[in-house]
Amino acid sequence: MKRFTLFVALAVLAFGFSSLNAEAKLTSGMATGKAEFQSMGPLAFGPDGILFVADTKAAAIVALSTGDTKAAPAGQSLKVEAVNQKIAGLLGTTADQILIEDLAINPISRNAYLAVSRGRGADATPVLIRVKTDGAPEVFSLDNVKFSRAELPDAPADKMVGQGNRQSNPRRESITDIGYLNGRLFIAGLANEEFSSTLRSIAFPFKTVDNGTQVEIYHGAHGQFETRSPIRTFTTFKIGKEDHLLAAYTCTPLVQFPVSDLKPGAKIMGKTIAELGNRNRPLDMIVYQKDGKSYLLMANSSRGVMKITTENIDKAEAIKARVADKQGLTYETIEGWTGVDHLDRYDADHVAVLRRGEDGSLKLEALALP
Amino acid sequence: MFNTKGQRFKGSRLSEQAIFLFALLCSIATLTLCVKSVPAQTTATIKWVKVESGKMAVELTGLDAATLQQLAKWNVLQFQKLLAVYVGQPDANVPPMLGSYRIHNNALRFEPQFALEPGVTYRAVFLPGKLPGGLGNSVVTATFSPPSRDLTPTTVVAQIYPSSNVVPENLLKFYLHFSAPMRRGNVYEYIRLLDESGNPVELPFLEIDEELWNHDLTRLTLFIDPGRIKRGVKPLEEIGPSLESGKRYRLVIDREWRDGNGAPLKESFEKAFTVAPPDRQPPNPADWKLETPNADTRAALTIRFPEPMEHALAQRLIAVTKSTGESIAGSVMLDDQERRWTFIPDAAWQSGRYHVVIQTTIEDLAGNNIGKPFEVDVFKNIQRHLTSQTVKLTFEIR
């Protein structure tokens, strides 16, 4: 019995060490101090409470070690009315003067993190907000945190245009989505000049010399044309044993391609597996399982939230011929889930959504997965 | 500048008439401070003050030494129960605003973390009963409103590119230039594309939350919804292109769009144009005509394009170098409806051979690149990529 107890104790200790080791490895290259941001856009959680924050203005990704690693108790929920008013009050301004850029749920603590812009002008201040289960938003202080930073390769070109004092470089690349998978961070971008499709992949922990991988993704449409187009939102998904990226494009197709194809300089032909139809503006996307089946849940500015079955995704053929609506994977629109701007996985059975009411107030809540 | 109001509730030692008279006096005279007596601190008051940094803060004064000594040990949550600042009218939804508390010159000072916004009313709330040894439920408030911004409209739409009044059916984007920085958020509400009958074209643009602004928010990039341009995708098949060849349109910018100060535009703006057939031909620098200057002058080097080029990229992606590859500094201008590119060197031209170096990612109005059309027909064996990232045109200066 004693020996067994000792064995268990050693096992627990070993597990603790390995977990600590893994955490230490991920944060080993991080500096401690003030993390500076020019802006905050898309958010994504990695392992061990590490939050990736895209700084579009600075063309950089910052990895923050939030230290928020205490597991949420079972049954924890989330419901915050008028979260935009609450955040505005905290920041000493009015609700019409803040913009919520993205939402991410810490998969360990299930606390919600929001990238917020205080102000809507060029002098706006980015603020990271955390909402715990008590529903009271708080500013996540960046004054003394562990963080590392990756400057994006091919950051806005330095060529200035204009004359004299009016010289400026108006090019800017917006980061439309970021996601973490197996030690790599994927970054989808959209420039405000060239219309191109770029997906970068950067190893994490960030290395100073890692320029990342930049690939160009084409996708076949219905007809004979293959096109380039920026990715609006993406998620990762296993098909068989292989990791895939599922990307929703600005021109509506849902495209899949194996992560292993993302090699430096590669030109990838993604497989169009669904056309989500007209007036479709995908905003955010997650994958979940229910009753032994996998689904995609996609927030869509005009169609509400769409639930897309992935049952036959491994068998899905690329759409090549002109087809009727709902070709490829089938989907349904979730009644009543209107005004969803952002969503993220909450727990195995819930999704966190940020919903806009008719009066403009935003509600942050966890809803049962459909 | 200061607008201070006092209110008192049960627990007061003053008579009701005295309270009423006091509150009335405070309101009418807009006193800068409002004093209330409490059991523990009969002289404790709050007021808004301008502090050393030039920012506004709230000070709680009239505290005795023993109270100050105790307050020095308090944490933020304790301070917030005693003195907090709120935005606007009392609302259970609105938490106290962030800031720091410290004892300064025998006063408790609250300094807001963020700058106060013009035109917004800030309400400092002091609960004397929460002082050490304090009793009662009295509430003292002092409000402050920084002066509102001047909302006289001054900002205008300075230019919309392409500046031509004829565009191809597969036009990829517009650039909206403003005379001053604008405000982010819901920008697409202020942009309409109207057809010949004045009816709005349904969802013609790519509306994305990020809003493709330049750094100082003076230029917005407005992509036409690519689903309405690309052949073979559903939006184009079902509702057709945003722009149809042979038809006339107006791009209308609503004057209610707010600039960085929150003021509306001085006037609305309209760009009327007609639509030509789609352009699927990549631009070819071999068709560009160079007009070269003479040596020992700072005269312009000019390139004439057979079609309008995309405004931003034509300015950024064409450079001039010596034959050795060394860059020539100078200024670039694009005019004649983006069909003429002009380069004036900072120093006089010297005799010799030069190159115009063009990045192949330069675009025409339909997003066709050099050597690569916007859409590639997979059934035709078109070279999708040039191996080179640049194309050179060579010229001599004599």
Image: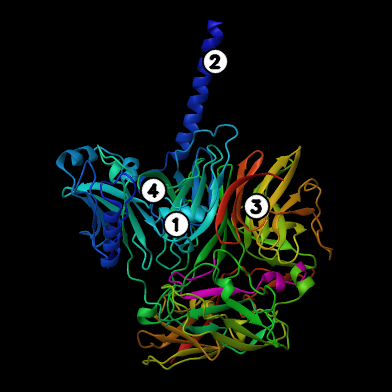
- For the record, the magenta segment spans B211-234
Q: Residue at label 2?
A: A8
Q: Which mark is residue A88?
A: 1
For the N terminus of chain A, the quadrant is top right
Judged by depth in the image, the label closer to the viewer, 2 or 4, is 4
Q: CA distance from mark 2 to mark 3?
A: 41 Å
Amino acid type of the residue that numbered disc 4 sits on in the rendered structure: Leu
Quadrant of the rendered image containing residue A198: bottom right
Q: Where in the figure is residue B393, as x and y percent of width and height?
A: 54, 82
Q: Where in the figure is residue B186, as x and y percent of width and height?
A: 55, 68
Q: Where in the figure is residue B8, as x and y percent of width and height?
A: 32, 51
Q: Secondary structure at mark 2?
A: helix
Quadrant of the rendered image containing residue B360: bottom right
Does the stretch in magenta take in A118? no
Q: Residue at label 3?
A: A285
Q: Residues within 10 Å of mark 3 (few under 14, many from 20)?
A: many
Q: Earlier in the sequence, mark 1 or mark 3?
A: 1
Give a yes or no on whether discs 4 and 3 share a subunit. Answer: yes
Q: CA distance from mark 2 to mark 1?
A: 50 Å
**Residue at the (42%, 63%) spot, across then down:** A124
Does the stretch in magenta take in B230? yes
Q: Residue at label 4?
A: A142
